[in-house]
Image (cartoon, grey):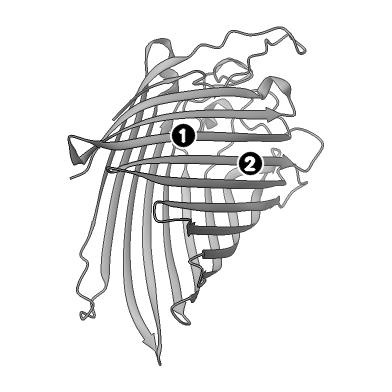
Amino acid sequence: MSLGYDSNPFKLSSLSENAQTTESAHVEGAAYTAFRLKYQGDNKTPKSSKKGNFRYRVELQNNLYSGSKSAADSLSIKAHLSWIEGFKLGQRKGNIRVTTDLRRESNTYYSQTQRQIAETSSGDLIDDRFSFDGADVGAELTYYRDKKLSWSLLSKIGQRNYPHDYRDIGLESIDYREFRLQPGLRYRANSGLNTRLFLYQKFRHYSGLSNNPEEDYALVEYSLMGFGMVLNKALSKNSDASLYLNGYFARDNGEGIRDLNYHQLSFKFNYQLGMGADFTVNVKAYQRVYLKAQSSPEESETGAAGPSRAGEHVEFVYSRPLLSESLKVSVSLRAEYERNTITLLGYQRQLMAVSLLYKL
């Protein structure tokens, strides 16, 4: 459980609608309470057993804001199941992992441009526009060349359903199906540096979103070519660091109004202070750019969105045991900054929280 304060729950600009650069708009913060429950386990068997390993995990995250900021509330429920089976090819080892992921996200669509719960040009509220249910099924084959190097191939199919598509008021369905194919490589150097590299090709087919609203059959199809690199290493007996670079190049099958490039760089540093306490720094920078000169497509009628945005997140977390090893307390400080081609869509946000974590 966490108790915290969010200076900008709706990620609003501090500039007023009629201002160019100097006039300020009032942005109110709010206290919030976050609940997180996580339950996981497995039926891990002895190495001598030939049986596979079944794992499961269920997570619930609920953020509740106080007073008039209740529209910032969010609820996330995730379930993960996996089965891992080992095998041998000659003198080499490998395994196959089959997974199922279920997910539900509930939140209120709050428009940054309207500075209120989003509504269409006709005045219809579309507060549940982006709440969704999702499901994915995947299989990953991993082959170990030796103790240092392994290869993998992941395939996954999934579907996302937005229960409130608002078709009755003229909005297009944004439900979609997706297929992903991802080869990868892992390598552990003598220095202790762990490296993971992967590429992926993802195909997304929308069930009701059209390239041309007058032609229902011209449905949007997305092709995403992505990449990722993960580096992690112990820097000393008490510290370690990791670096994650990822991104994708998305292209649609129409006139390219949804074509975009996305890149993200994340860094994490962890230091163990002794007596069970540790200090963590998380840094993230990202950029999303639509390739067409015009703004991104607006299926939700909430005003223009900038064709380019970039931002940074910085977080500091200190945690230590409280009374026993099973109970931990942590204090976190987080700052977010985003710049947008449309100045009024840029924002600043600061969060601070005190959390209690109990582990059974």
Earlier sequence position, callout 2 versus callout 1: 2
**Picture coordinates of residue 191, whole percent (x, y):** 51, 68
Badge 2: residue crowd in 10 Å (few <14, some 14–19, many ≥20) = some
Q: Which mark is residue 286?
A: 2
User: Residue at 68% of width from left, 29% of height from top?
Assistant: 339
Horizontal relation, residue 111 to residue 142: left or right: right
> Does residue 296 appear in the picture of this structure?
no
Question: In the rendered image of this protein, does residue 34 appear above or below residue 153?
Answer: above
- Amino acid type assigned to the residue bearing label 2 in the image: Tyr
Viewport quadrant of the N terminus: top left
Q: At x 65% / y 56%, what residue is drawn? A: 223
Check contact, mark 2 vs mark 1: CB within 8 A.
no
Helix, strand or loop status at disc 1? strand
- Give the quarter of the figure containing the C terminus: top left
Task: Tell me the amino acid under the disc marked 1.
Answer: Phe
Left or right position of 318 against 116: left
- Residue to which mark 1 is pinned: 316
Q: Nearer the viewer, residue 69 or 135?
A: 69
